[in-house]
Image: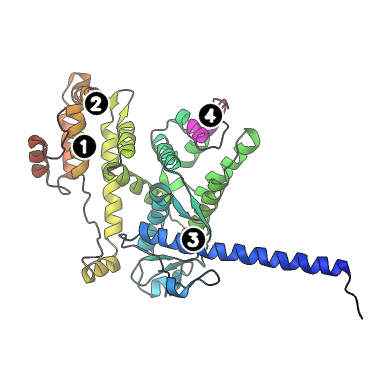
């Protein structure tokens, strides 16, 4: 009779338990990935530019995940994309916009967007696969990120430094005053000469230098987000070497600030439009111009327009910048918020003159986008809000 060494048995038991453990973890990963896919499907269900594969629940389980087949073109093959008749500029625009929506709107971000997980579809859409690795951001973190964008636009470096504390990059008791000049230098060197100078990888590299000089730590969730953004910027440069990330990102943020009815974003819009108690007419004009650019970019893709015509009920390609609700909310604030009303009246009469010229400039920017007469009637009648008058 041959005896088995106890050491052999222990080794066998170890590897068996390890196999059982990883099998269990693998099953949990597949279940979670299916949930992630369904969350992405829900988030992008009304977006005509993004394709998320469906999950075949009846064919899936703890050991296998069956998804809809994606027939697309590898996102880093510019020649194949062009030969398929896909507009490269349009594809990049929908890609950046979808990434920003994941980060700033949904708080559920694809954590592994390498070229094998992103495809260009022949109708101009972007398709994502492999949802096993995602970053989840809280509502608070999303709002702070939007704050950071607003503070960057306003060149408010003190608040930018405070945003780093609020996001967890700095401990709450950290004195941010030494970091403020460094942040200003990085941002000014990145966009000081215009959006064309901005490169996310270069900015990230400069920021990494701060880690060695200041008590900055990068939270794990943001490490994943940064890596994801760097990967996607690299894809953009592969398709279009002179691609300018901010030329797409800023118009998206401008449109979001001007049109999103979320109260937190309305508050951010007010922060942008008022500086030291003065109304910033030029900022309003710039926001409208950028937002209109976003709408024009998204609506100019011929393939998406054709898709919209084929599926008019399901697909909606916005062709105009609809500021109706924003104007209504502005009117409500004017009549119900004494502070806002005083600031707006001062904005119209500051420097001892009526700012009619600025009003005319703003009107010319939006006159072809909305029915101002109809909006004015609704404002006058007070029909747009049940609490219009307090």
Query: Distance between the Cα atoms at labels 1 and 3?
Result: 39 Å
x 10%, y 40%: residue:
378
* Towards the viewer: 87 or 304: 304
Query: Distance between the Cα atoms at labels 3 and 2?
Result: 44 Å
Which class describes the residues within 10 Å of circle 1: few (<14), some (14-19), or many (20+)? some
According to the picture, the residue beneath numbered tag 2 turns out to be 340
Which class describes the residues within 10 Å of circle 4: few (<14), some (14-19), or many (20+)? some
x 34%, y 62%: residue:
49
Q: Is residue 362 visible?
A: no
Cβ atoms under marks 1 and 3 closer than 8 Å: no
User: Which region of the structure is painted magenta?
Assistant: 161-185
Q: Left of 26 or right of it: where is 266? A: left
- Please state which of the two labelled residues, at mark 4 or mark 1, is closer to the viewer: 1
Q: In the rendered view of the protein, which quadrant contains the N terminus?
A: bottom right
Sooner in the amino-acid sequence: mark 4 or mark 3:
4
Sooner in the amino-acid sequence: mark 2 or mark 1:
1
């Amino acid at each position: 009779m041959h005896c088995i060494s106890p050491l052999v048995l222990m080794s066998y038991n170890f590897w068996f338990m390890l196999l059982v453990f990883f099998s269990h973890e693998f099953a949990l990963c597949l279940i979670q990935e299916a949930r992630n896919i369904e969350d992405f499907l829900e988030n992008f269900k009304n977006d005509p530019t993004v394709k998320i594969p469906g999950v075949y629940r009846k064919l899936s389980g703890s050991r296998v995940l069956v998804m809809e087949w994606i027939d697309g073109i590898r996102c880093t093959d510019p020649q194949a994309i062009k030969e398929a008749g896909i507009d490269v500029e349009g594809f990049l625009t929908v890609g950046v916009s979808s990434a920003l929506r994941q980060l700033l709107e949904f708080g559920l971000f694809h954590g592994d967007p390498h070229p094998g997980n992103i495809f260009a579809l022949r109708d101009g859409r972007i398709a994502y696969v492999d949802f096993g690795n995602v970053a989840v951001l809280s509502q608070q973190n999303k709002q702070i990120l939007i704050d950071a964008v607003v503070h960057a636009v306003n060149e408010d470096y003190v608040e930018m430094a405070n945003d780093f504390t609020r996001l967890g990059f700095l401990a709450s008791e950290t004195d941010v005053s030494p970091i403020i000049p460094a942040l200003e230098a990085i941002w000014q060197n990145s966009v000081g000469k215009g959006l064309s100078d901005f490169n996310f990888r270069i900015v990230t590299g400069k920021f990494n230098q701060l880690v060695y000089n200041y008590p900055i730590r990068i939270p794990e969730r943001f490490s994943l987000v940064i890596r994801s953004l760097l990967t996607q910027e690299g894809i953009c440069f592969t398709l279009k070497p002179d691609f300018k990330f901010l030329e797409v990102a800023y118009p998206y943020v401008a449109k979001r600030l001007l049109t999103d009815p979320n109260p937190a974003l309305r508050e951010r819009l007010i922060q942008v439009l008022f500086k030291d108690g003065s109304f910033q007419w030029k900022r309003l004009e710039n926001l409208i111009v950028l937002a209109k650019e976003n709408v024009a970019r998204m609506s100019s893709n011929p393939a998406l327009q054709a898709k919209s015509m084929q599926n008019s009920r399901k697909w909606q390609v916005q062709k105009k910048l609809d500021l109706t609700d924003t104007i209504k909310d502005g009117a409500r604030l004017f009549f119900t918020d004494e502070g806002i009303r005083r600031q707006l009246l001062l904005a119209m009469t500051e420097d001892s003159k009526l700012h009619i010229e600025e009003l005319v400039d703003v009107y010319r920017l939006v006159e072809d986008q909305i029915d101002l007469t109809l909006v004015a009637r609704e404002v006058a009648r007070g029909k747009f809000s049940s609490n219009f008058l307090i």
